[in-house]
Image (cartoon, helix red, strand yellow):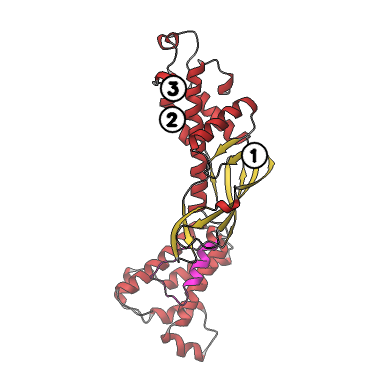
């Protein structure tokens, strides 16, 4: 059975070297997890904080330090009864620190190395906290600038407010300001459970990037579908994709007269009328909106919240409209 690093009888200066390297890796792992969560994830999605950085450091950690200041004793270099540390000892220690202790953010007020090392040494002695730096830059959508832009921690908060219910059950309230317009900061609510971080809140709501080839009149429905799917409501996303197709058909001038004659045309009937307006070569080479509509309808009727169905249909819709642009067919 592996033992915590503090309980192993390693040469003291060797352990100091390992502590510094391992502490830096742990801090960097948490920082990167926060960056990925705030940049790439949507509401209620999560990331796991693992020991990947530690695994990468193992070759260095298993070698005696080369610095004169940290050089191991001659007896250790030449070989002694003191056992050399093992890979599993370092990995065990890293996972224990990550999973069993509160995480405290420095909000970039200290260097990651200094803060992480101090935290690591304190944890070895008292098992209280693991310090880390929040990412100094995250790239996310700015509603004022209307584009994805770098954001920095909002120092007006003074610190990242943290609510700790238990050592492994925490909430982080964070603020980030746009580098360009410096308008009202984006507020994030992040929950930590064990080694998992989940994005539980964001104000203002995050934007999604909708393909430019989609018609502007009905593009918002496609965006709503993406938001729903990203938030784990796949069936709602499938429904919004079908609404997007229906509303696109209803917006076409060629369907104005048939809809005026019968406002209750079914989706299949509108799809048939739309297909009649497309060139034969187009229909043989590119996805059919009628076919996508049929697949979405089947999923809705079966209450089948299948993410693969959503991704396939969203991709086919985008491909269809990209082909319309290529053929210069007006939408």
Magenta span of residues: 208-228
Measuring from the top left, give residue 175's x and y in whole percent. 56, 54
Dot 3 or dot 1, earlier in sequence: 3
Q: Are marks 2 and 3 in contact (CB under 8 Å)?
A: no
Tag 3's secondary structure?
loop
Q: What residue does disc 1 label?
A: 168
Q: Residue furthest right?
A: 165
Q: What residue does disc 3 label?
A: 62
Q: Is residue 169 left or right of residue 71?
A: right
Task: Report the residue at 50% width, 63% height from top.
Answer: 207
When the figure is inspected, residue 214 is found, relative to residue 186, above or below; the finding is below
- State yes or no: residue 221 in magenta: yes
Depth order, front residue of 175/199: 175
**Label ID, residue 57:** 2
Task: Report the residue at 45% width, 68% height from top.
Answer: 292
Q: Is residue 242 visible?
A: yes
Crowd rating for badge 2 (residues with CA inside 10 Å; few <14, some 14–19, many 20+)? some
Crowd rating for badge 1 (residues with CA inside 10 Å; few <14, some 14–19, many 20+)? some
- State yes or no: residue 180 in magenta: no
């Amino acid at each position: 059975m592996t033992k915590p690093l503090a309980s192993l009888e390693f040469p003291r200066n060797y352990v100091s070297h390992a502590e510094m390297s391992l502490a830096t890796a742990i801090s960097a792992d948490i920082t990167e997890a926060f960056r990925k969560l705030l940049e790439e994830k949507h509401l209620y999605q999560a990331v796991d904080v693992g020991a990947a950085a530690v695994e990468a450091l193992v070759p260095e950690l298993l070698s005696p330090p080369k610095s004169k200041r940290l050089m191991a004793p001659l007896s250790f270099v030449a070989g002694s009864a003191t056992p050399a540390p093992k890979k599993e000892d370092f990995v065990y220690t890293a996972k224990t620190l990550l999973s069993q202790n509160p995480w405290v953010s420095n909000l970039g007020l200290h260097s990651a190395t200094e803060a992480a090392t101090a935290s690591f040494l304190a944890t070895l002695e008292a098992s209280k906290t693991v310090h880390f730096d929040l990412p100094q830059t995250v790239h996310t959508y700015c509603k004022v600038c209307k584009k994805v832009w770098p954001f920095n921690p909002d120092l007006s908060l003074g610190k990242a407010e943290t609510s700790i219910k238990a050592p492994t059950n925490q909430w982080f309230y964070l603020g980030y300001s746009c580098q360009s317009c410096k308008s009202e900061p984006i507020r994030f609510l992040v929950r930590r459970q064990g080694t998992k971080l989940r994005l539980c809140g964001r104000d203002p709501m995050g934007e999604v990037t909708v393909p430019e080839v989609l018609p502007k009149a009905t593009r918002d429905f496609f965006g709503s579908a993406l938001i729903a799917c990203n938030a784990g409501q796949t069936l709602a996303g499938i429904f919004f994709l079908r609404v997007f197709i229906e509303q696109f058909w209803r917006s076409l001038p060629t369907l104005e007269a048939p809809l005026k004659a019968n406002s209750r045309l079914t989706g299949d009937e509108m799809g048939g009328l739309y297909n009649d307006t497309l060139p034969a070569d187009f229909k043989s080479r590119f996805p059919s909106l009628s076919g996508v509509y049929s697949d979405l309808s089947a999923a809705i009727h079966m209450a089948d919240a299948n993410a693969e169905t959503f991704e396939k249909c969203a991709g086919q819709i985008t491909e269809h409209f990209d082909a319309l642009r290529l053929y210069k067919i007006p939408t």
